[in-house]
Image: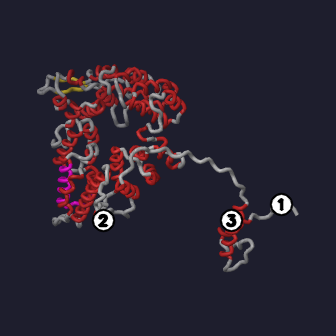
Amino acid sequence: MSRTSAPATAPPVWEELVTAALLGTERRTPPGCAPGPHAPTALLDAAALETVRRRASLRPARSAERPAPAPADHRPPLPEAAARRLALLLTDRPGTGGGRRGSAPDLMELLPQWLAAANDHGYAAPPEALPALLDAARGRTDLRPAALEFAGPRALWLARLNPDWRFALRAAPGGDSALPPPEETDRVRRLWEEGLFAERVALLSSLRARHPAGARDLLATTWATERAEDRLMFLDSLRTGLGPDDEPFLEQALADRSRNVRATAAELLSALPASALAERMAARAVTCVSIDRTRTAPTIVVETPHECDAGMERDGVVPKPPNGRGERSWWLGQLLEAAPLPTWTRRLGGRTPQEIVTLPVADDWQGEVHAAWCRAAVRQRDTAWARALLGSPTAPEAGGPGAVSLAERAKLLGVLAAAERAEWVAGFIATHGLSEAFQLLGVCAVPWAAPLGRAVVDALNIARDAGNYPWSFSGVMGLAERCLDPSEADRFDGLSAIPDEPEDASPGAGGYWAEAFQRLVTTLRLRATMAEELEPGPALTDVPRAQRPR
């Protein structure tokens, strides 16, 4: 008798077993089994037997080609203590504490600082930490640049094997780890012409950082055939290394068929005070602003543009205002923010920026004019104007004469040097407290300078003495944990005690404040320990494990 396959009409045993498992043995008796209490056991036995039979009938297949070995990472390895710390930082996840963290530091919020410090030392990531590191970077885009730089070439090797980590292929560390160097012109051109959009953006950004003219010339080769949305992204990369040599290319982009591309080109040209567009904008702007000397005190008077002509549109002026905004004031603001700021010293009688911003402005135009000058100071990185518009941090109006919002004040602060920025914010907090300081603190360099750190802690102490709950200041407290100089920790020990609560204090507020300050001190000391662990050599090896900060 020859061996033949089972009749086509025979029911497949495996499907029958699956059906019985899904419906339950009380409703469907497994094939070859008797109904009753022993049916579930018989079902499992039959499934085990059928599994062996199915596997035995498989034909051997050709084995898949092994992946190439991961590239070597020749950077020095992490010190042992730092490697253990990294493992702890990567295992902490938001919400794992079950709500309130108490006095325990938020380790995930310390991971960005740890990665930055490890990259400064030039360490290689431990291979066993790479999966957790890539998972963390996948969940937090703000971590990706530092995490991928630390992970090195092996991260890209792993990303090709796991779809969940494909983001690493689109955002290589520094934008250039998987990109050809500028001198390999053939590879550069091939990637530019054939690569994916994200790869082309990364390539252009990388070239722009190292060889601005080469990046611009590469973009020019395909500019006419690019999609409008792609042209906009590519044009934005020219902000890096922007200089006078970019003016001819940007002038051509002013005639682009996309309004957004034209607007971006005009913005970049207006950041070049000597550009032809800046001169055209200055010529338009000076017709709108002048000094009226017939009044008791010299006063700025404003005459808004009567139309938005084709030349203004070509130079980036958007003709249609947002809802609720008048056309002529909308045009005026765009002209003023695009005009070079030295224009106003010449136009307004040789006055300095400080003198100009203190001049009265007629007919309630001060807010509009000063807001436009704020945007111009940020765009042109003009420290003198930024300083003048910010004014004194102790001013009663909680801001300078031209800073009409916290967002504008924060942008103006970003123009100043780090030390001056910290000094201004410290003065602001000492005068006005913390209620409006969070956005301003976010632009200060880390670690905070000593005067700024003292101002923040003193303001927190004042808020505690007022008897309110600390939750209104949780954002500032979180910034303090990450940004205060760790060497200041000893000064805050006294604040972690539970204070005597005044009669009108919120119930239990003192205990919550003590807990918040305990977390602050613990976090600062942990940051100091993390820095020590990253130092080359046997950091903390002589300290007993039980005494090491956790």
Dividing the picture into quarters, in which one does residue 326 lie?
Answer: top left
Q: Specify whether residue 463 is painted magenta.
A: yes
Q: Earlier in the sequence, mark 1 or mark 2?
A: 1
What residue is drawn where x is 45% and y is 32%?
Answer: 181
**Is 83 or 166 nearer to us in this picture?**
83
Q: Which mark is residue 546?
A: 2
- Of all residues, the one furthest to the bottom in this rendering is 37
Classify mark 1: helix, strand or loop.
loop
How would you rate the neighbour count of disc 3 (Cα within 10 Å): few for under 14, some for 14-19, many for 20 or more? few
Q: Position of residue 297 (x, y in %)?
A: 12, 27
Image quadrant in which the C terminus is located: bottom left
Q: Position of residue 145 (x, y in %)?
A: 40, 43
**Is 76 or 455 nearer to us in this picture?**
76
Dividing the picture into quarters, in which one does residue 525 lie?
Answer: bottom left
Residue under label 1: 4
Dividing the picture into quarters, in which one does residue 384 lie?
Answer: top left
**Is 289 or 457 nearer to us in this picture?**
457
Which residue type carries mark 3?
Thr
Q: Position of residue 163 (x, y in %)?
A: 53, 48
Give the Cα distance between marks 3 and 1.
21 Å
Taking the image as shown, residue 233 lies to the left or right of residue 14, namely left
Q: Position of residue 529 (x, y in %)?
A: 28, 55
